[in-house]
């Protein structure tokens, strides 16, 4: 064998060994938890929901889910563990549709029995399409299926080797990282009325109010997804809740002519879910103390972790529960409050 051939063979073998070592390191440490839960001595360092959420749902030990969009990321899982006697993990999809979130719940049920599902309903999710949006929005769908043969973008990835794994090891061994704060983004953020207002692009003139049934087809589809989920799992207690968006958000929905449709959509989904024995619904949107104090917000939607804890306490204490007798009154209160906001409260920030 010539010297050139021996060199090529040696180079080829060394390359294969390096690739095999890289694959082995990623598979063993597994910072996205595709193949197993954290190894002994390592913590569940969760900061990238698009890459880690599905893996945690398949490999972690839990019996409860905190399901929702970015407004749910600042809940601490341990609050729910202590308050409800469960072990909770998050199923988070920023701006997630109902279809996306139901996909996460279905994924959890593949290998877990759930005592509780704490499910935040965003107003924007109710008129959304009923197909999942993972592929359309560029999510790593190769991590969402169960085909290990297409995992090479994960297993052979220098960012995983030289950034994600060291990051996981550092947070596991150095400092007091709290695993309950999975996907938490509140640290280093500023919650301030001036900032929230600066991030609100207010429409100069209100548009005509749309018919309240403008999204009826999509709404019916999403109600069907939620109802099917509840019906399929009668032994799970589903706690649906509506988070308090700022008065800037309500002003925006009014000025874009969407307010009436928002409230109609909420009324329909509440009326559809309330009859189920394994469902309860909490309504926090009309808390004027929270939503009219812009210092609670960093933008028109996202509130501080203090508000997350306040909402959790009210859940565990049984407060703000909707019933067949009171839900229409609460929604009418929200309508009246939103009207007061656009006619009076908002003028403190946007004088006529």
Image (cartoon, helix red, strand yellow):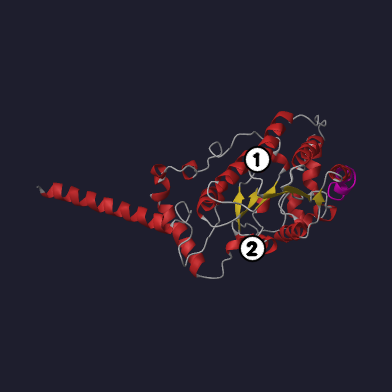
Residue in the foreground of this view, choosing between 190 and 148: 148
Q: Give the extent of the magenta segment.
A: 337-352
Nearer-N-terminus badge (2/1): 2
Residue depicted at x 47% and y 45% = 143
Which residue is labeled 1 in the image?
Answer: 98
Magenta highlight on residue 348: yes
Main SS category, magenta section: helix
Answer with left or right where residue 317 lies relative to residue 30: right
Answer with left or right where residue 221 lies relative to residue 148: right
Q: Quadrant of residue 252?
A: top right
Residue 298 percent across, percent down from the top left? 71, 54
Name the quarter where the C terminus is drawn.
top right
- Structural crowding at the residue carrying mark 2, measured as other residues with C-alpha within 10 Å and reported as few (<14), some (14–19) or many (≥20): some
Circle on res. 78: 2
Q: Is residue 192 visible?
A: no
Residue 33 percent across, percent down from the top left? 48, 54
Answer with left or right where residue 49 lies relative to residue 215: left
Magenta highlight on residue 308: no
């Amino acid at each position: 064998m010539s010297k050139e051939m021996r060199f090529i063979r040696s180079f080829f073998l060394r390359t294969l060994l390096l690739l095999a070592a890289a694959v082995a390191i990623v598979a063993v440490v597994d910072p996205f938890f595709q193949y197993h839960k954290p190894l002994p001595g390592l913590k569940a360092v969760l900061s990238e929901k698009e890459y880690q959420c599905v893996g945690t749902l398949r490999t972690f030990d839990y019996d409860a889910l905190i399901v929702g969009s970015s407004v749910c990321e600042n809940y601490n899982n341990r609050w729910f563990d202590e308050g409800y006697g469960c072990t909770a993990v998050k199923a988070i999809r920023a701006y997630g549709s109902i279809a996306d979130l139901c996909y996460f719940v279905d994924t959890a049920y593949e290998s877990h029995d759930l005592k509780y599902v704490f499910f935040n309903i965003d107003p924007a999710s109710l008129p959304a399409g009923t197909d999942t949006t993972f592929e359309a929005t560029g999510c790593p769908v190769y991590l969402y299926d169960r085909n290990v043969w297409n995992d090479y973008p994960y297993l052979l990835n220098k960012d995983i080797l030289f950034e994600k794994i060291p990051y996981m090891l550092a947070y596991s061994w150095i400092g007091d990282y709290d695993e309950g704060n999975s996907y938490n983004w509140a640290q280093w953020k500023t919650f301030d009325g001036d900032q929230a207002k600066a991030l609100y692009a207010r429409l100069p003139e209100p548009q005509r109010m749309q018919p309240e049934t403008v999204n009826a087809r999509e709404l019916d589809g999403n109600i069907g997804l939620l109802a099917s989920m509840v019906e399929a799992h009668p032994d799970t207690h589903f706690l649906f809740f509506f988070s308090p968006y700022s008065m800037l958000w309500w002003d925006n929905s009014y000025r874009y002519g969407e307010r009436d449709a928002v409230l109609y959509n909420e009324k329909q989904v509440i009326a559809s879910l309330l009859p189920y024995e394994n469902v309860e619904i909490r309504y926090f949107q009309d808390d004027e103390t929270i939503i009219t104090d812009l210092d609670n917000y960093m933008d028109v939607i996202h509130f501080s972790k203090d508000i997350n804890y306040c909402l959790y306490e009210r859940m565990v204490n049984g407060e703000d529960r909707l019933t067949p007798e009171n839900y229409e009154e609460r929604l009418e209160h929200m309508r009246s409050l939103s009207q007061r906001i656009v006619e009076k409260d908002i003028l403190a920030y946007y004088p006529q």
